Image (tube, rainbow, N blue to C red):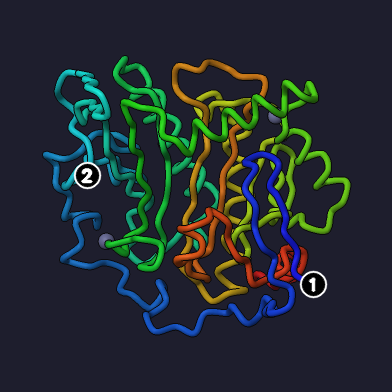
Amino acid sequence: MPELRQNLATREWVIIASERARRPNAYVEERTTPLHTELPHYDAACPFCPGNEELDLEVTRHPLSGPWQTRVVRNKYPALAREGQLLRSFDGVQRQITGVGYHEVLVEHPQHNTSMALMAESDVCAVFDTFRERGLAVSRDPRIEQIVYFKNHGVRAGASLQHPHSQVIALPIVPGEIRHRMEEARRFFDDTGECVFCRMLHDELALGERVVAANEHFVAFVLYAASSPFHAWILPHRHFSSFRVIGDEEISSLAAIVRDVLRRIFYGLNDPAYNLVVRTSPVKEGDSVYFHAYMAVIPRLSRHAGFELGSGVSINPTIPEACAAFLREVAIP
Ligand SMILES: [Zn+2]
Ligand SMILES: [Zn+2]
């Protein structure tokens, strides 16, 4: 019998299609595009490779002198404009805000043909350090309400350039997706006096069957109500709601666990496309007792179609516990 499961943090339902469930190894990618490692080390046409830097777009780099490790550049085709006044208008059914904000690209590494799964742990740590730094910088802008940190890896995840990079978009509004999560988390707190994420973390660790990896500061698990194959969350043990307040030791631990999970996905599933998203509370929300910052890893192995659009309910053709066991057992070199 198929099963409907609800994610208590988001209240989203998914159908675990156990009748037609495929084994996790059915998702090992049959590649039509070359593996990242098969690409050249350097690409003369790549704007992110050392030597090709578009300096007019540069926001910052680390280190400031000598060869860089990470760079932040303005997106050449930004979704939002840095300059300009925040103006709101509302007229009956038409609400409008000027499109001010930030759209930055974080070049994660000088090497063209690497990825977070293949980088040294300290390199991944440098990426998250730069995330935090840019988050702190743009959050000082009073026009900004929400920061979205994300990574698209592979064409199916929306990446248009192969050089390893992530993005930071800072918005003058709180998007519905965040508002909805904040409201559900507040409702759970009102009902139980607990943070729903702290509760999930506690229960997942106690059960263990969906845990993929854990370290001093974080735990990674495939969601009970995973909306797609291998959909995982990485939660900090310490309760904090904004990614900007993450500590130095926590950043190192985060780099270690994200790299570990991505290596399991890379070697176990043959480098599929994935998205990485940091969920963090709205900038002006302050430190909230009911919301808990986390990171989502979403391999793009199944497609959402009309049913998902029409219902908001996903059909997951895998069993989350089997996906977690598969990832735990991947032999990583
Ligand atoms: Zn490149
Ligand atoms: Zn919490």
Instruction: For marks 2 and 1, give the CA distance.
Output: 48 Å
The answer to whether the residue bearing label 1 lies less than 8 angstroms from the nearest atom of ligand 2 is no
Q: Position of residue 235 (x, y in %)?
A: 66, 40
Q: Does residue 190 sit above or below 248 in this rendering? A: above
The residue at the point 69 percent across, 77 percent down is 21
Assign the N terminus to one quadrant of the image: bottom right
Q: Which of marks 2 and 1 is in front?
A: 1
Q: Which amino acid does label 1 sit on?
A: Met
Q: What residue type is labelled 2?
A: Asn
Tell me, for residue 1, which label it has, or none. 1
Q: Of all residues shown, which one is farthest toward the left?
A: 56
Q: Where is residue 277 in the image (x, y as percent from the top left)?
A: 49, 46
Q: Position of residue 14 (x, y in %)?
A: 64, 57
Q: Mark 2 points at which residue?
A: 75
Secondary structure found at label 1: loop
Q: Quadrant location of ligand 1?
A: bottom left
In the image: residue 101, left or right of residue 274: left
Assign the C terminus to one quadrant of the image: bottom right
Secondary structure found at label 2: loop
Q: Picture quarter containing residue 188?
A: top right
Q: Picture quarter containing residue 5?
A: bottom right
